[in-house]
Image (cartoon, rainbow, N blue to C red):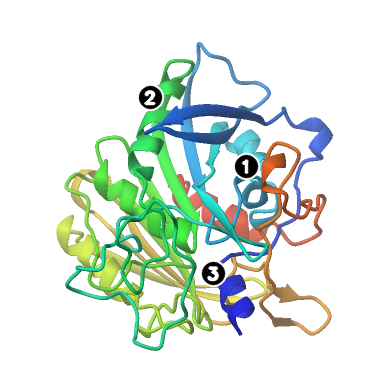
Amino acid sequence: MAKLLKLERLIFLPLLILISPSLLAEMKRVDMQFDNEDRHYLIYSPKDSSAESPIDLVIGFHGYAGTASGFELEVTGGFNQFADKYNFIAVYPQSLYLFEEGDYYSTFNDLTGSKSGSQLLEICTLDAYKYPKFSNCKYPSRCSYQPCTDDIGFVRQLITDIKKDYKIQNIYVFGNSTGGLFAQRFGCSHPELIKGILNVSATQTFGYGCIPSLPVSLTIYSSQKDTAVPPINVEASDGYLYEPMSRVIQNFVDKFKCKKVYNETVKNNETFVKMQYTECADEVVITSILNLEGYHVWPETGFDDLTKKSKWVPYGYCATDLQPELKNEKCRENLNIDPWGADFLVKHLLSIYE
């Protein structure tokens, strides 16, 4: 049961690589010191990009027990292909991690799952699953599962460093599961830096929601059958508590005074109910996308061509040769899954509407 709950937090399925890996530029690793800790991130620049030309930056955060390289290659099925297609720099930070009884655990600190034992509002039920505690948390609460490190400062610093080498125009953040929680928290903490947030298979921790003080566009994608971070019910399968998707969206709509809403049912292999709020302050766009058939995965990635039904299969906690110290299983390449879903989300993140 514990293993299943761990995997439910991971997580996502692969997508089809649109462009052959041999045609892509090389992804690189950047090591740095931040807050007296060894940190690193992976960075990919499109083959045709140059330091002199203005370009956007897209930062992606892996989920619980995930890795930066596993997120790029397996979770998103090769997200670098979209950096080439839409011409942006892609960056994948690695969170802190630990090993317990041979198992690998990792996650970012979104300032909710690292609360001390004195926090007033608990984020999990009394019988919730007990996740490992990070050693840098002096007084972890019963519900703590994140490291007590300044991940927001870490990401802010890597943005500063990247701006020294590139003429960055707009910055977007996205993530899956707990990575989605962190992406939204970073957007709330630094709205002066961020133009758009994509929160995939996550909402916000119950009682600890946030709204940016400056205009930032938001897209939240979730699935009706997701039990790891449920979009409607407050309590997840592991006993942790999350804000309903509709409440998070409404808070943003109210904050940025959106005047119009457009409802649409999108049908591919799966069925999606989309609500998009426009005519908001400073051209902000707020979008909710609910998959009526999927699970805790990206759109379409759990669809089985043989059964014509959706399913949940965990991926994303592997590692490539860029992260040898993680000692995780090796990531798979050239995974044959319909790319429609990934492209669908990327367009919403970048506000590319056809």
**Residue at 38% of width from left, 84% of height from top?**
235
Where is 240 relative to 88, above or below?
A: below
SS for callout 2: helix
What is the tally of numbered marks visible in this picture? 3
- Marks 3 and 2 sit apart, C-alpha to C-alpha, by 30 Å
Q: Is residue 39 left or right of residue 150?
A: right
Disc 2: which residue: 160
Name the foreground residue: 209 vs 329.
Answer: 329
Q: Position of residue 62 (x, y in %)?
A: 54, 53
Q: Position of residue 219 (x, y in %)?
A: 40, 58
Q: Is residue 220 left or right of residue 282?
A: right
| Three-letter code, disc 2 | Thr
Q: Earlier in the sequence, mark 3 or mark 1?
A: 3
| Three-letter code, disc 1 | Phe
Q: Which mark is residue 9?
A: 3
Where is 178 relative to 69, above or below?
A: below
Q: Earlier in the sequence, mark 1 or mark 2?
A: 1
- Look at discs 3 and 1 and give the one toward the viewer: 3
Q: Is residue 332 left or right of residue 322?
A: right
**Residue at 47% of width from left, 56% of height from top?**
179
Q: Which mark is residue 231?
A: none
- Look at discs 1 and 2 and give the one toward the viewer: 2
Disc 1: which residue: 82
Q: Residues within 10 Å of mark 1 (few under 14, many from 20)?
A: many
Q: Position of residue 177 (x, y in %)?
A: 49, 64
SS for callout 3: loop
